[in-house]
Amino acid sequence: MDKLFEHFNKLLRETDTGFFRYLYGSINWNSRMIGLTGPRGVGKTTLILQYIKENLNPADTLYVTAEDFYFADNKLLDLADSFVKTGGKHLFIDEIHKYKDWSRELKLIYDYHAELQIIFTGSSILDIKKGVSDLSRRAVMYHMQGLSFREYLQLFHNITADIYSLDEILNHKIEIPELPRPLPLFKDYLQRGYYPFALEEDFDIHLQQIVNQTLEADIPMFADMNVATGRKLKRLLAIIAKSVPFKPNFSSIATMLSASRNNIADYCLYIEEAGMIAQLRDATGGVRGLGKVEKIYLDNTNLIYSLAEDAPNIGNIRETFFLNQTRVKHEVLSSPVADFQIADMTFEIGGKGKGQKQIESADNGFVVKDEIEYGFGNTIPLWQFGMMY
């Protein structure tokens, strides 16, 4: 156990508290059990270490990762028992899905130790969702995605901006005096600004490793897939990456992958839950997430630039950005007349030459244009939708 504390204290010393992700202030840190999920590489570990450094006493706090060799011979429940006996109050467990039967042991820790707070993170949200259902009402769950354009400006360029609501954006309320020319920075964000680790060297290699780890390890481990099926997931992602955007035809995909048509929808759901793609649904389902899938996008624009073998399609990039940034606070659906629908609002996405034709029949329509700095009337600059979180 001493080794665990030694590793924890080293990480704490190295944790920078100069920048906090959007979710930091939204978490109720007083809850007895908190779960934080999200794709690999978006900064979950840093966030919890920052909270410890800023708010807790390291003497009664312990951070561990479930990947630690310690757990090859020791149970999480036994660690919690020993920790509480020495005065422990806050136990943080990173990469919890790497620990077998984690949800069962977390339930026992929660029930046995009322004085102990448990906070856990997981990258493979598939397995996390499966386990959280077992935790019933015990865990308060939060989901974190990658950097918004607003967060990128602060982390990469030290430009501070407020968070703006959708209504404020549509009414041209954005004011960022430090950002006189947003378009060059916006272009850089689309290519390399979604993941905090882009500040480090070898960003492209690191991102490819995350994709491979997700498709070849995380999803197959959850779904009991063999190696060959894991490779089919990579081929499916490659098909989506080359499309503009991808309109799913499960029969043709099944033929291309030499797979059963009945499995393709499951494959897409697995990849979506793991943070690699986003499926745009229509409004027919009646319940969130149950509508028919109309289009499939890569999850974020950095993935497009990383995975598209030829020059990425700019229209696909624009639509992907809009969906990625607006979905954090709104349910985004496909529009029967344009690209997207949020509540009673219709959005058509395009370049600076995009006209009004697509939204002529919409009662509350907006044209979202790339390559313009400022908007007017119902024309809104694309980059401004990156200020929502």
Image (cartoon, rainbow, N blue to C red):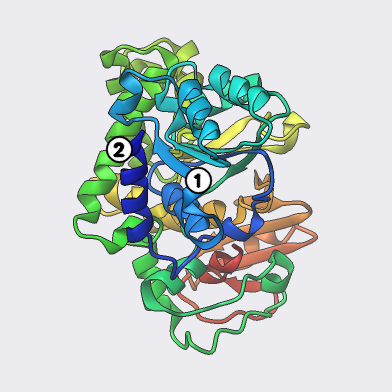
Viewed as shown, does residue 317 lie left or right of 377? left
Q: Residue furthest front?
A: 86
Whether residue 135 is visible to the viewer of this picture, yes or no, is yes
Between 144 and 187, the one nearer to me in the picture: 144
Secondary structure found at label 2? helix
Q: Residue 3 has which mark?
A: 2
Residue 221 x/y as whole percent? 38, 18
Neighbours of disc 1 within 10 Å: few (<14), some (14-19), many (20+): some
Report the quarter where the N terminus lies: top left
> Residue sitting at 45 percent across and 34 percent down?
274
Whether residue 269 is visible to the viewer of this picture, yes or no, is no
Q: Earlier in the sequence, mark 1 or mark 2?
A: 2
Between 386 and 48, the one nearer to me in the picture: 48
Looking at the image, residue 305 lies above or below residue 376: above
Residue 111 x/y as whole percent? 67, 23
Callout 2 amino acid: Lys
Neighbours of disc 2 within 10 Å: few (<14), some (14-19), many (20+): few
Looking at the image, residue 189 lies above or below residue 281: below
Label 1 to label 2, Cα distance in Å?
Answer: 14 Å
Q: Residue 46 has which mark?
A: none
> What is the quadrant of residue 2 in the picture?
top left
Residue 39 x/y as whole percent? 44, 41
Report the quarter where the C terminus lies: bottom right
Callout 1 amino acid: Thr
Secondary structure found at label 1? strand
> Residue sitting at 46 percent across and 39 percent down?
275
- Number of numbered callouts drawn: 2
Between 321 and 75, the one nearer to me in the picture: 75
Residue holding disc 1? 61
> Residue sitting at 68 percent across and 48 percent down?
30
Residue 88 x/y as whole percent? 54, 40
